[in-house]
Image (cartoon, rainbow, N blue to C red):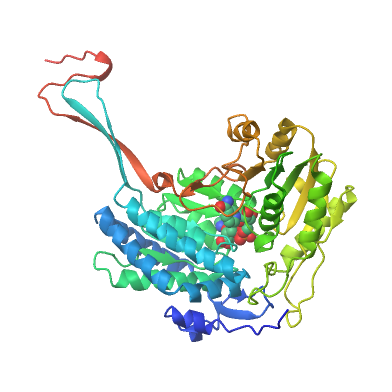
């Protein structure tokens, strides 16, 4: 592997109009997972600044909700164009700050562009219903109105895409947005947000304060969760975080949209196409160094295919090119930090102690990047689920099980607390339809002949159970960002009452 010199992020920040000289002090430190070097520092938002930001956001709401939705879409269209122009610089920042390989970082920026396009179309399709009234000369409507400031709390592993799924929809729906990015990826957020600010500044109908970034850790996230002025908090991250945010927001009767941890499974059936299966498994389990919410973590292989598939996987995992994500031939970049590495090693130790057979999983030395945490993705053969395989460890560990009947495999797929994504590799129509039926996968996402990761923006994204139940991105996910109003209009001069109620007055 060729040695790679880390580029200072100055170039990519300056490319989006940010002065890197302003990023040298403050309590938030951005460290590159590539080699642990500090990329920049900035200060957390103070409580006073937070309150001032909220006041601007509320004022912006009063103006923005009155702007016609297609004009709001035009703002998002211009933002999408700006992202297109800056795609390489934004992708470079994702690589530097989150450690993604080049094609995955560019793919994440592409997702931002795609959801902008989706939101522009949506801005002319915020459809309501007309409903037949039981009363003469009456009609009923269901209409969708803007809801108010939307808080968006995001995780480190999709430092741009997740915000964009929320922000673009919230904006066309008539709401201001407030973004609290992960404390591990503040520069990426600053750069993308700076682009939106520059578009807002040139868009006459867009009020000041329409979009804001509040930087900080958990405490700033808690301000958002507790703030009754914010009707919707969309929070992406661990189940631990969602459990706390969900309770806080519910306690003030706010609305939360939770996108939390996954523990995703794949079933490889007797009829599975082997090459397809091996490629799908390897990308879904080892890609992004196992740091996707949809990463494949549990594999159920039919007993007749187990030995052959496992042999292929061992070879594939052993040959993965691990190293700096700045090198063009790297497939697996670093874990985000030391804690992620330690959590991975602890899970592997627990699996060994429980009788699991572990292949790989060791730290990999990458010359010149000794402070980075690079690992060989691990395969763990297990006879039955254990405590470690029942939870999400945010690292590339794939637990592998044999199964005998499709019913057993589906029960295994569903037998965890999380419910994000799932997949089945088969050529058997009956198995495929069973997996997709009400008796099949209990997850928010169910795929046939592809892995559980790499969703498109056109579908609603999210999961059940401890994954939080939220849906973002495509389909009708936009409804979460609006309030529904049922309207009844009487165009007669009499007043018939519903359900035939009589209430005659003199
Ligand atoms: P994390 O839970 O540590 O942090 C996520 C965000 O929540 C950060 O911005 C953090 O500052 C904030 N936060 C933490 N505690 C909080 C609290 N009590 N109140 C308010 N805010 C709080 O997650 P992470 O390590 O950054 O990301 C990895 C996790 O995110 C994994 O579990 C992964 O599966 C999940 N994830 C889920 C999805 C999805 O769509 N379901 C997408 C990406 C990541």
Which one is in front, 49 or 430? 430
Outermost residue on the left side: it is: 493
Q: Quadrant of the N terminus?
A: bottom right
Q: Is residue 454 left or right of residue 126?
A: right
Residue drawn at 37 percent across, 71 percent down: 197
Front-most of residues 6 and 88: 88
Counting from the top left corner in percent of width and height, residue 465 is at 61, 40
Q: From the image, which quarter does the C terminus lie in?
A: top left
Residue 311 position (above or below residue 54): above
Q: Is residue 141 left or right of residue 167?
A: left
| Residue 503 point in image, percent of width and height | 20, 15
x and y percent of residue 233 in the render? 47, 52
Is 440 drawn above or below residue 86 in the view shown?
Answer: above
Total residue callouts: 0
Q: Is residue 140 left or right of residue 241?
A: left
Q: Residue 307 or 56: which is nearer the viewer?
A: 307
What residue is rendered at 43% in x and 69% in y?
A: 193
Q: Position of residue 458 (x, y in %)?
A: 45, 50
- Residue 115 falls in image quadrant: bottom left
């Amino acid at each position: 592997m060729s040695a790679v010199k880390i580029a200072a992020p100055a170039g990519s920040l300056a490319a989006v109009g940010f002065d890197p000289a302003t990023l040298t002090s403050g309590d938030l430190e951005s460290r590159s997972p590539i080699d642990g070097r500090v990329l920049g520092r900035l200060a957390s938002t103070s409580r006073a600044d937070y309150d001032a930001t909220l006041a601007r956001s509320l004022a912006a709401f009063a103006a923005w909700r009155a702007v016609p939705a297609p004009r709001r879409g035009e703002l998002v269209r211009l933002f999408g164009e700006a992202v297109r122009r800056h795609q390489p610089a934004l992708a470079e920042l994702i690589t530097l700050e989150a450690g993604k390989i080049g094609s995955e970082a560019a793919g994440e920026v592409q997702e931002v562009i795609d959801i902008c396009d989706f939101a522009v179309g949506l801005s002319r399709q915020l459809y309501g219903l007309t409903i037949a009234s039981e009363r003469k000369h009456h009609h009923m409507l269901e209409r969708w109105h803007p809801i108010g400031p939307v808080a968006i709390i995001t995780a480190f592993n999709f430092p741009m895409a997740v915000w964009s799924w929320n922000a673009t929809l919230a904006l066309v729906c008539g709401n201001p947005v407030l973004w609290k990015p992960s404390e591990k990826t503040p520069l990426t957020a600053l750069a993308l947000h700076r682009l939106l600010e520059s578009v807002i500044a040139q868009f006459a109908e867009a009020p000041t304060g329409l979009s804001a970034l509040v930087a900080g850790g958990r405490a700033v996230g808690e301000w958002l969760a507790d703030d009754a002025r914010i009707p919707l908090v969309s929070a992406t991250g661990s189940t631990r975080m969602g459990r706390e945010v969900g309770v806080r927001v519910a306690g003030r009767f706010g609305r939360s949209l939770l996108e939390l941890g996954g523990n995703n499974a794949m079933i490889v059936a007797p009829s599975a196409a082997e090459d397809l299966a091996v490629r799908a498994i390897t990308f879904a389990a080892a890609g992004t160094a196992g740091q996707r919410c949809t990463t494949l973590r549990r594999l159920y292989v039919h007993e007749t295919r187990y030995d052959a598939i496992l042999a292929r996987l061992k070879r594939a995992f052993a040959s993965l090119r691990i190293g700096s994500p700045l090198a063009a031939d790297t497939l697996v970049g670093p874990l985000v930090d030391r804690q992620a590495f330690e959590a991975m090693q602890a899970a592997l130790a627990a699996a060994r102690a429980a009788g699991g057979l572990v292949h790989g999983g060791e730290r990999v030395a990458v010359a010149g990047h000794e402070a980075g945490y690079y690992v060989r993705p691990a395969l763990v053969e297990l006879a039955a689920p254990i405590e470690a395989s029942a939870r999400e460890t945010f690292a590339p560990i794939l637990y592998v099980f044999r199964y005998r009947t499709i019913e057993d495999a589906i029960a295994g797929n569903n037998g965890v607390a999380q419910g994000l994504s799932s997949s089945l590799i088969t050529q058997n129509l009956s198995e495929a339809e069973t997996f997709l039926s009400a008796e099949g996968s209990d997850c928010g996402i169910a795929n046939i002949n592809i892995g559980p990761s790499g969703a498109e923006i056109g579908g609603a994204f999210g999961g059940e159970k401890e994954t939080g139940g939220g849906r973002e991105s495509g389909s009708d996910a936009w409804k979460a960002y609006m309030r529904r109003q049922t309207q009844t209009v009487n165009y007669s001069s009499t007043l018939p009452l519903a359900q035939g109620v009589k209430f005659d007055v003199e």
